[in-house]
Image (cartoon, rainbow, N blue to C red):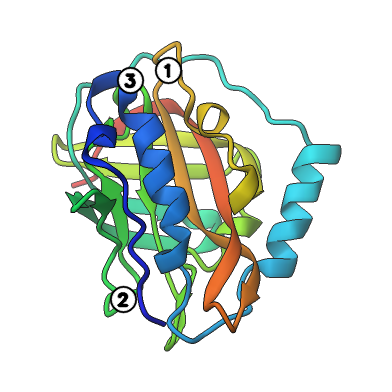
Amino acid sequence: MTAHRAGVGADARPDGRTWATAAVALLLLAAWWLGPAGHGGSGGDTGAAVAAAVAADHPPHVYAPHAPLPAAAPTRLDVPSIGVHASLVGRDLTDGTIDPPPYDTPGVAGWYRGGPAPGAPGAAVIVGHVDTETGPAVFYALSTVQRGAVVDVTRTDGTVAEFSVEAVEVVQKDHFDASRVYGSGTGRPELRLITCGGSFDRTQQEYSANVVVYAALTGSHPVAR
């Protein structure tokens, strides 16, 4: 597909505590380019089932706040329960839009470095493709992750920030509540993993929703040598 770049005005550029509201607009609209390049159907039914389960029978489990870590850039993401073991690349804004992870490296995820680092206070954001024209990508199975699943983020300071999944949702583009999805008003260290979900419109070449995984910092340990 042709990557659609959804513009956001310069006044929405993330800065300090206001970054989350700007980032959500970028990331949600980024569903236009986080979808596949001509390869659809990967996340719709499963994602919808997960969303229904979260809403009906599995309310989010909220972990007690963990002491934040000093800010350090992330280099690797591991979600063992769904087979995610990915390098991370920092993504910035270009002309008011967030740069997506490259399509030619579908196994790589992107950390939005205009926001918090994973483990630091606030909600860090990592995005990845669900699939591309060549097949499944890094977050193909993201909608199937379970509450309590471990998410490890390796950082440049030699530590691994340990997160635990609190909830998974599939959020329709036109019902995305930025303050709820990205809210971390207490400064609790949190993580959001985001990809495309819902149904795939082959005419428009886009997905109808985003899969959002909410996780909280629950520990840390040194990188194994």
Q: Nearer the viewer, residue 95 or 217?
A: 95
Task: Residue 83: give x, y in percent of width and height.
Answer: 49, 64
Rendered position, 86 above or below 216:
below
Residue found 59% across the figure and 83% down from its top: 202
**What residue is shown with label 2?**
103
Q: Nearer the viewer, residue 176 or 51?
A: 176
Q: Which mark is residue 121?
A: 3
Rendered position, 134 above or below 57:
below
In the orientation shown, which residue stands out farthest toward the right?
Answer: 57
Rendered position, 161 above or below 154:
above
Nearer-N-terminus badge (1/2): 2
**What residue is shown with label 1?**
188
Numbered disc in front, either 1 or 2:
2
Q: Nearer the viewer, residue 212 or 206?
A: 206
The span from disc 1 to disc 2 (Cα, nearest Å) is: 32 Å
- In the drawing, does residue 49 fall left or right of residue 221? right
Numbered disc in front, either 2 or 3:
2
